[in-house]
Amino acid sequence: MAALPLILAIDQGTTSTRALLFDGAGGVQATAQVALPQIFPRDGWVEHDPEIIWRDTVQVCRDALATASDRAVAAVGITNQRETAIVWDRASGRPVHNAIVWQDRRGAALCQRMVADGHEAMIQARTGLLADSYFSASKIVWLLDHVDGARAAAQAGRLAFGTVDSFLLWRLTDGKVHATDATNAARTLLFDVHRQDWDEDLLRLFGVPRAMLPEVVDCAGRFGETTPSLFGQTMAITGMAGDQHAAMVGQACVAPGMMKATFGTGGFIMLNTGDRVVASRNRLLTTPAWRLDGRVTWALEGSIFVAGAALQWLRDGLGVIGAAAESEPLARALDGNGGVYLVPAFTGLGAPHWDAAARGALFGLTRDTGRGHLARAALEAVAYQTCDLLQAMQADGAPPPATLRVDGGMAVNDWLMQFLADMADLPVERAATAEATAAGAALLAGYGAGLHESVERASQVWRAAGRFDPGMTLASRQALVRGWQTAIGRLRGSPA
């Protein structure tokens, strides 16, 4: 029996870089991972070193491929942290500055001016997004305005911009391909999602030269080939999508009404709306779920800036826990939350508030407050923020999903998943593979390489490894929600 073809998935995330080898049936044959250092130059600023991203990508790919023996890799898929902006010199390939990460808020003042000047309605109508520094445009502007000579070089066509997918594609193809896929382009504030092209009015508004932008392509197709010197073989790059979009595919949320939540550094909830473009009235995002064969499947999305990052703060910043996994037994040991609420607005509040000026706060501390209360508050905050997004989606006319499919590092926490099911009053299903994002990239690459008849058919391998059904009383749920809403209100300057 012939060996199943292998697909290499590169998953370049906010806190780690990973490579996974999948077989044609979706099984993981090898994995390699390395942590990505975070750079915090000042309050609200977050950066990554692009050269470390590149070095680590090459290393984890080599480590994963070392297990493949003499089996050929049929395709490569790339998935990435979205919105993170990198600008590099076309001649040398060298970045002009550190990558400015999606969490970074240095562009907030520019975006606030856009709103004050009355541009947000146009921005939202064309991009499906809000005028917020979460997205790439204000990051590009900062780089052009603060790196010596950058604006003139960009106008002359000497600089290239890309999100992480685009930067990796450039490097993997030795500078032959400057492209991005539709999902990543849609997170820049510069892309008209309806026309599926860069928008000249938005480029003028932000002052971004079109010459520095990549070509926008489908999420599956033949984008280019890896240069042979990197991995000892030439591999076709045939799949590419932002991490949350890849997770939608990996979670098999391929039919309208299906919903997934990914809980990693941040938390991201996406609802498949099929061919229906839902213009949110509740400050959610209208975004392509993916684009295949020139056809867009749409999604409604809500973003939580801080999810697992709150546990990292408890671990690394306060020393309250030694590892993220300790949060589960600490939370489980308590009868209740003791009235303690954490609003983890370390880099502002995401949807549906979009408050860049907000900063994190703890409420309800007493002399009885201990490590367990802090750990539980960090976990509970993920569920409360998810419920805020679910309510906003329903207010936009989306019916409640039959289930909420979850993945990401925090999804392994049984206590959190049960609490989420209780608070959302919705069954929660955890994917059998913890690698939903990479699996989605592999599925897209397999489709782009002609190995799959369709993404829908390929995704039928999805299985649940755990289900959490709601069991909390309505009175208990309402009391907890009131506490959360009071904390949010106080954080934002109102009594409730």
Image (cartoon, rainbow, N blue to C red):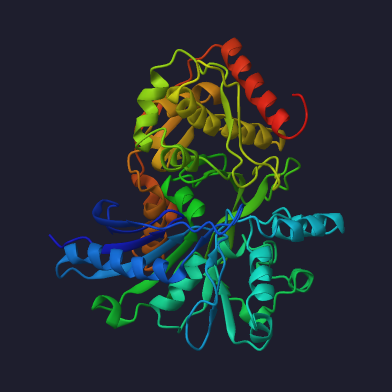
Is 440 positioned to the left or the right of 300 in the image?
Answer: left
Is 56 positioned to the left or the right of 87 in the image?
Answer: left
Q: Give percent across and percent down for residue 380.
A: 52, 28
Seen as rendered, the residue at the extreme left is 1
Q: Nearer the viewer, residue 298 or 405?
A: 405
Q: Give percent across and percent down for residue 164.
A: 49, 66
Q: Give percent across and percent down for residue 349.
A: 65, 42
- Quarter of the figure with the N terminus: bottom left
Residue drawn at the location 76% of the way across and 24% of the way down? 495
Quadrant of the rendered image containing residue 108: bottom right
Seen as rendered, the residue at the extreme right is 117
Query: Vertical placement of 459 versus 162: above or below?
Result: above
Query: Vertical placement of 320 versus 274: above or below?
Result: above
Residue drawn at the location 37% of the way across and 68% of the way down? 449
Is 60 positioned to the left or the right of 459 in the image?
Answer: left
Residue drawn at the location 35% of the way across and 77% of the way down? 226
Residue drawn at the location 61% of the way across and 46% of the way down? 301
Seen as rendered, the residue at the extreme front is 367
Viewer can see residue 96: yes
Is 337 positioned to the left or the right of 329 in the image?
Answer: right
Q: Nearer the viewer, residue 315 or 442?
A: 315
Quadrant of the rendered image containing residue 409: top left
Q: Give percent across and percent down for residue 261.
A: 50, 40
- Quarter of the figure with the C terminus: top right
Q: Give the mark count.
A: 0
Viewer can see residue 402: no
